[in-house]
């Protein structure tokens, strides 16, 4: 793609409508603070949460509000969204920049800027949770996040973001977690870190998706975290490359989280990384990548192993979108599940060390008490068991189903307080605090 | 534009039941072909009869009960093939027919078909045949690996499975390399057999027969009848090895020892499994 093309795409993008869902985090839906026909600027706050878990939402374009109505959401069915039509200008609100900010400033900046982790948790809540944080981990082993955000020019920003997080959380140390065979990234971070003494690099073998936060913390710190807790309970603030970039932008430049880097792969003409305004529809993102090559069969958001298959390409990009994979209609799997032959291939690959196939068989028969005894709630939903299953059984789906039923049976939502997703009332948050890569579920 | 919505994961490794079964069948077919050199072309009739009986039984049962035909997954073929390998080549041909029917109808389908069997159908059928017609199913010769070339081709073999250990070893290593079978059971089975035999002062030339390798690489790691837990598979392998040597030490027949041992191990596998459930990494403390 030439620079002219890029410019053209950018111009086109600006003129379009954006659909900004008022729910892009774990928590309740934000209240819109703009009305129909209100003129908004880039970066203006358009939705504010009314409970402690909620995260404000900002406009990613300048224009006027066309409507506030329910629109399709990549994960949560349909959600109230603010639809803004651009007026082809790039007028922004006044961004408050700062150099070498104190701790309180960082935290208040994060509160206003609505930075959300890839799993839907708000960084502001994590920093103000009254839990003692002694380590900040930034997970650079999730391939989708790395391919979108770890371009060479971003490395310094990621390290700056890490320093801001360490400062804000009063942590003693920080560490980057990188996959072993990603030599390029390791050397890039190493050369960026030459003067930071308290930041280390850890290498891991696996691809740790955001839902595997507890396992990642265990691998790095050796602390076992029960599936009802988060790394925060062990004093670890786990962040990602995209959040580190967003933190740096929010604190030093004063720009709230209004754009995300999205990698587009698969059956498109020009796959690559795009900087996308939040609220842009997936269709536009794919058009900016040259459009579909061939008949698209499946659009997958956030990970081919555990991502969500979208029912339409009219859904917007949200804060936790990190990559989009398009499968052509020939690539789409059409398999009929067979019987479980107990080959235990799923047991061998399971990172949580449970018996996925057995749990799925019990869930299939409705024996959820047996699933509970077999630790169904320890499942981190990585999707590896389905990947290796020779019978193509719906292991992950059955496990999620069992979690849902158990949650209803055992009334876990009482313990979780209001952190559940209240919009669709299906208790998809189950009892694991860190949910599928999609983020808000 | 039609979009498919489905649950993750959206790609597969590409290993199916078919691949696993048919690779085992190919290895056993190579073994059967090498045995033609020892027993002559007559064994092909035994193979054919046994496999056909197993396949037809499966097809008949699935037709009668209005199930989908699953012959192409290769399980019935594998059962028939193993039954033929476990019998002496000069056996009357109605015995493998009865054996294959017993294996497929009573040991496999009566317990719920593929994936639900308690015993390995071929071994259970062999035990049944051996109990019923012991004089007819006994072999005329017991293999003795006197020289290294006997591993390649053992002319003293009494059954087809004992002809070539090398085919089974190479085939087994291939299956392990491809992860079609688990590595724990073969490793612990073989090593514990050798260690036990050395401790009891047995001659390894009688222990390391083709039947042992068939047990180590094909029969014991049979997915359905072995435990699914990782530690369970280690215990299962150790149990198989120890029992094989004890049985062989007391009866002086290491060929039959392998089969009865795996039959026994199949019976205790659920018990092993139940006591070796893994501890999840992020378990909630009680």
Image (cartoon, grey):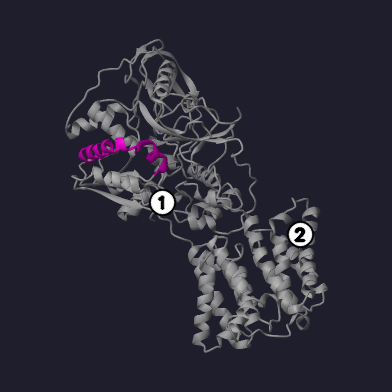
Indicate the quadrant containing the N terminus of chain B: top left, top right, bottom left or bottom right: top right
The stretch of residues the image draws in magenta is A142-168
**Which residue matches tag 2?**
B58
Tell me, yes or no, whether the highlighted magenta stretch contains residue A239. Answer: no
Q: Indicate left or right for A254 with B17 as reference.
A: left
Q: Position of residue A183 (x, y in %)?
A: 34, 49
Q: Chain of mark 1?
A: A
User: Of helix, strand and loop, which mostly describes the magenta segment?
Assistant: helix
Q: Quadrant of residue A45?
A: top left
Q: Quadrant of residue B255?
A: bottom right
In the rendered structure, find residue A206 and report the number of the disc placed on it: 1
Residue B189 position (above or below residue B13)? below
Q: Indicate left or right for A400 with B67 as reference.
A: left
Q: Are marks 2 and 1 in contact (CB under 8 Å)?
A: no
Indicate the quadrant containing the C terminus of chain B: top left, top right, bottom left or bottom right: bottom left
Q: Indicate left or right for A40 with B1 as reference.
A: left
Is residue B267 visible from the viewing direction of this image?
Answer: no
Name the residue rendered at 52%, 27% in the picture: A291
Q: Position of residue B50 (x, y in %)?
A: 77, 68
Q: Residues within 10 Å of mark 2 (few under 14, many from 20)?
A: many
> Do badges 2 and 1 share one subunit?
no
Q: Indicate left or right for A4 with A370 as reference.
A: left
Q: Nearer the viewer, mark 2 or mark 1?
A: 1
Q: Chain of mark 2?
A: B
Element assignment for label 2: helix
C-alpha gap between disc 2 and disc 1: 43 Å
Name the foreground residue: B192 vs A48.
B192
């Amino acid at each position: 793609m030439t620079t002219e093309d890029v410019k053209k795409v950018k111009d086109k993008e600006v003129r379009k409508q954006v659909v900004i869902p008022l729910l892009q985090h774990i928590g309740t839906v934000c209240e819109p603070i703009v009305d129909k026909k209100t003129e908004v600027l880039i970066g203006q706050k358009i939705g504010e949460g009314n409970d402690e878990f909620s995260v404000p939402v900002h406009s990613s374009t300048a224009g006027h509000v066309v409507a506030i109505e329910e629109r399709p959401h990549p994960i949560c069915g349909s959600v109230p969204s603010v639809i803004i039509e651009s007026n082809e200008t790039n007028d922004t609100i006044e961004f408050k920049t700062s150099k070498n900010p104190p701790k309180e400033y960082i935290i208040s900046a994060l509160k206003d800027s609505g930075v959300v982790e890839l799993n839907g948790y708000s960084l502001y809540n994590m920093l103000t949770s009254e839990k003692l944080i002694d380590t900040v981990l930034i997970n650079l082993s999730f391939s989708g996040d790395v391919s979108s955000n770890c371009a060479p020019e971003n490395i310094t920003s990621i390290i700056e973001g890490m320093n801001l997080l360490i400062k804000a959380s009063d942590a003693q140390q920080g560490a980057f977690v990188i996959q072993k065979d990603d030599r390029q990234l390791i050397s890039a971070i190493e050369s960026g870190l030459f003067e930071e003494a308290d930041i280390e690099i850890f290498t891991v073998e696996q691809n740790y998706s955001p839902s595997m936060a507890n396992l990642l913390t265990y691998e790095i710190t050796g602390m076992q975290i029960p599936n009802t807790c988060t790394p925060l309970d062990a004093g670890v603030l786990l962040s990602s490359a995209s959040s580190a970039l967003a933190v740096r932008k929010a604190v030093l430049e004063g720009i709230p989280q209004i754009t995300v880097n999205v990698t587009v792969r698969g059956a498109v003409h020009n796959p690559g990384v795009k900087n996308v305004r939040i609220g842009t529809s997936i269709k536009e993102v794919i058009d900016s990548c040259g459009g579909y090559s061939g008949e698209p069969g499946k659009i997958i958001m956030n990970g081919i192993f555990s991502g969500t298959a979208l029912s339409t390409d009219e859904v917007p990009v949200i804060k936790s979108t990190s990559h989009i994979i398009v499968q052509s209609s020939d690539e789409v799997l059409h398999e009929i599940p067979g019987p479980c032959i107990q080959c235990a291939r799923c047991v061998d690959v399971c990172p949580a060390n449970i018996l996925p196939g057995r749990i799925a068989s019990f869930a299939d028969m409705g024996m959820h008490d047996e699933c509970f005894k077999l630790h169904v709630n320890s499942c981190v939903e990585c999707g590896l068991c389905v990947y290796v299953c020779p019978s193509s059984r719906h292991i992950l789906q059955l496990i999620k189903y069992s979690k849902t039923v158990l949650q209803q049976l055992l009334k876990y939502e009482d313990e979780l307080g209001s952190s559940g997703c209240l919009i669709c009332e299906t208790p998809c948050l189950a009892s694991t605090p860190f949910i599928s890569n999609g983020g808000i579920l | 534009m039609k979009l498919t919505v489905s649950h993750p994961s959206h790609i597969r490794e590409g290993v199916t039941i078919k691949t696993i079964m048919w690779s085992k069948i190919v290895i056993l077919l190579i073994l059967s072909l090498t045995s033609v050199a020892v027993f002559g072309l007559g064994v092909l009739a035994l193979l054919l009869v046994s496999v056909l009986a197993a396949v037809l039984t499966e097809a008949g049962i699935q037709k009668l009960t209005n199930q989908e035909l699953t012959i192409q997954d290769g399980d019935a073929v594998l059962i028939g093939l193993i039954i033929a390998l476990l019998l002496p080549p000069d056996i009357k041909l109605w015995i493998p027919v009865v054996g294959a029917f017993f294996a497929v109808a009573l040991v496999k389908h009566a317990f719920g078909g593929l994936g639900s069997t308690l015993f390995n159908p071929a071994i259970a059928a062999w035990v049944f045949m051996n109990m019923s017609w012991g004089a007819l199913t006994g072999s005329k010769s017991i293999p003795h690996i006197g020289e290294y070339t006997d591993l390649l081709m053992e002319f003293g073999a009494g059954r087809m499975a004992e002809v070539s250990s090398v085919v089974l070893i190479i085939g087994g290593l291939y299956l392990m390399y491809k992860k079609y079978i688990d590595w724990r059971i073969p490793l612990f089975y073989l090593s514990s057999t050798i260690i036990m035999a050395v401790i009891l002062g047995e001659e390894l030339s009688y222990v390391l027969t083709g039947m042992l390798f068939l047990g180590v690489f094909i029969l014991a790691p049979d997915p359905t009848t072995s435990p699914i837990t990782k530690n369970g598979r280690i215990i299962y392998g150790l149990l198989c090895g120890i029992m094989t040597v004890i049985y062989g030490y007391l009866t002086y027949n290491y060929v039959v020892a392998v089969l009865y041992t795996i039959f026994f191990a199949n019976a205790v596998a659920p018990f092993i499994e139940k006591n070796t459930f893994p501890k999840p990494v992020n378990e909630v403390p009680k």
